[in-house]
């Protein structure tokens, strides 16, 4: 029977947002569902053209689907609603906001509305930083095992087993990555436009924890 000490080693690294993601939902309300669907398709095409004119590339725009319904709270009213969704990604928040702000003139019709739901952003760090964090996680595990082995009158004799555990990370507080829920979505109509002179800020960062479960073989002290 193997004698061993098993511990979990930890280290942290800093990751920065490298890509922002948003669900852009276009809503059209009309008396007839056929009219709502037709106008929503036309509105979608106009929004795509405007986003591209604002500098968004083809690979930053993806299909998000469509749906139509009659809201339950309109039971006493005549009306149908149709929606189209465009998935937008961008590595620069200011660029994203300028592009979305440019859509505002397309929604002067009171039957049209635009919602932007920020999704969890994508984070990254470079390989060198990640490898160093992994090395420090193992050294942290070894340090813990050394202390326990010494207290028990043992010494470490190599690694029997090692497993990388799921990483954990703090939340940044940005829309889509709020602290108070695991999968955040913050919805708000785009209005008022965004000026080219708006102040640009650094991308938010988060602290990610790297974890390894390490089982060290032990031998009695000589």
Image (cartoon, rainbow, N blue to C red):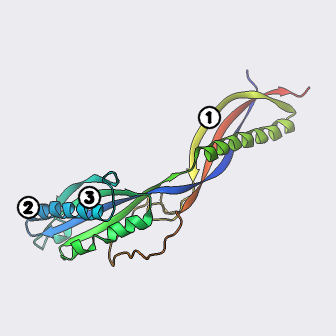
Neighbours of disc 3 within 10 Å: few (<14), some (14-19), many (20+) = many
Is residue 189 shown left or right of residue 37? right
Asked if the residue under mark 3 is in contact with the one under mark 2, i.e. CB atoms within 8 Å, the reply is: no
Q: Residue furthest bottom?
A: 192
The image shows residue 76 at horizontal and vertical percentages of 12, 73
* Of the pair 86 and 80, the residue shown nearer to us: 86
Q: Which of marks 3 and 1 is in front?
A: 3
The image shows residue 1 at horizontal and vertical percentages of 73, 20
Asked if the residue under mark 1 is in contact with the one under mark 3, i.e. CB atoms within 8 Å, the reply is: no
Helix, strand or loop under label 3: strand
Q: Earlier in the sequence, mark 1 or mark 2?
A: 2
Neighbours of disc 2 within 10 Å: few (<14), some (14-19), many (20+) = some
Q: Which of marks 2 and 3 is in front?
A: 3
Q: Could you tell me how many numbered marks the image carries?
A: 3
Task: Name the residue carrying label 3.
Answer: 85
Q: Residue at x 59, y 40 (%)?
A: 165
Q: Quadrant of residue 56?
A: bottom left
The image shows residue 84 at horizontal and vertical percentages of 22, 59
The image shows residue 12 at horizontal and vertical percentages of 65, 51
Q: Which of marks 3 and 1 is nearer the N terminus?
A: 3
Distance from Cα at disc 3 to Cα at disc 1: 41 Å
Asked if the residue under mark 2 is in contact with the one under mark 1, i.e. CB atoms within 8 Å, the reply is: no
């Amino acid at each position: 029977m193997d004698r061993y000490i098993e511990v979990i080693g930890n280290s942290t690294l800093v990751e920065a947002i490298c890509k922002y993601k948003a669900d852009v939902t276009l809503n059209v309300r009309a008396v007839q569902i056929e009219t709502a669907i037709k106008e929503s398709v036309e509105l979608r095409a106009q929004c795509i053209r405007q986003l591209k004119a604002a500098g968004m590339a083809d690979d930053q725009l993806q299909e998000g689907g469509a749906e139509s319904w009659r809201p339950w709270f309109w039971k006493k009213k005549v009306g149908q609603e149709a929606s189209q969704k465009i998935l937008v990604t961008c590595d620069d928040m200011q660029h994203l906001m300028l592009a979305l702000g440019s859509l505002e003139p397309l929604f002067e019709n009171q039957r049209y509305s635009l919602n932007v739901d920020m999704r969890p952003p994508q984070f990254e760090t470079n390989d060198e930083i990640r490898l160093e964090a992994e090395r420090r996680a193992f050294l942290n595990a070894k340090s813990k095992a050394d202390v326990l082995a010494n207290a028990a009158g043992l010494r470490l004799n190599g690694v029997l087993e090692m497993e990388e555990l799921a990483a954990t990370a703090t939340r940044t507080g940005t829309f889509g990555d709020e602290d108070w829920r695991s999968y955040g979505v913050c919805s708000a109509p785009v209005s008022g436009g965004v000026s080219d002179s708006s102040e640009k800020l650094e991308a938010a960062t988060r602290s990610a924890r790297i974890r390894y479960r390490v089982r060290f073989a032990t031998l009695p002290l000589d």
